[in-house]
Image: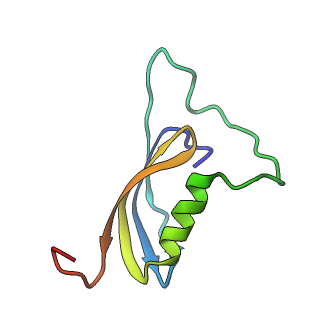
Amino acid sequence: MTNLGFGRFEYLRIERGELVLDPWPTVVRGVKFGAQDPGTVKNVAADFDLKPQVAELFEYIRDVDAGEIRCLEVKSGLPFSMEIEMAGRGRNG
């Protein structure tokens, strides 16, 4: 997410509370002209504090037995919002 900066991940599967990254999800980078280059690589220290948004995302994922994140929107290298399909749930579940 840090390297992406602004954009989204699509079709991230969740199984038993863990992200399945094989195959790698589709990554779509957002580019705004006249703004600072979103492709600039940011150096992240090996020893860093987990941001609240990332902790909340991981906490949510751990509570999902099976599902698929249709779209995880990233802003400033942090999770901003997501749309998730819950496996085995009806339309109103």
Q: In this view, which residue lies farthest toward the top? A: 34
x and y, in percent, of residue 89 in the image:
24, 81
Quarter of the image holding residue 56? Answer: bottom right
Say how the picture is coloured. Answer: rainbow
Residue drawn 44% across the image and 24% down it: 32
Q: Nearer the viewer, residue 85 or 21?
A: 85
Residue 22 appearing in the image: no
Residue drawn 15% across the image and 74% down it: 91
Q: Quadrant of the C terminus?
A: bottom left
Left or right: residue 70 versus residue 40 is: left
Residue 55 appearing in the image: yes
x and y, in percent, of residue 45 in the image:
81, 47
Left or right: residue 47 versus residue 85 is: right
Vertical position of residue 92 compared to residue 54: above or below:
below
Quarter of the image holding residue 50? Answer: bottom right
Residue drawn 43% across the image and 84% down it: 65
Q: Nearer the viewer, residue 28 or 69?
A: 69
Left or right: residue 54 versus residue 27 is: right
Vertical position of residue 88 compared to residue 62: above or below:
below
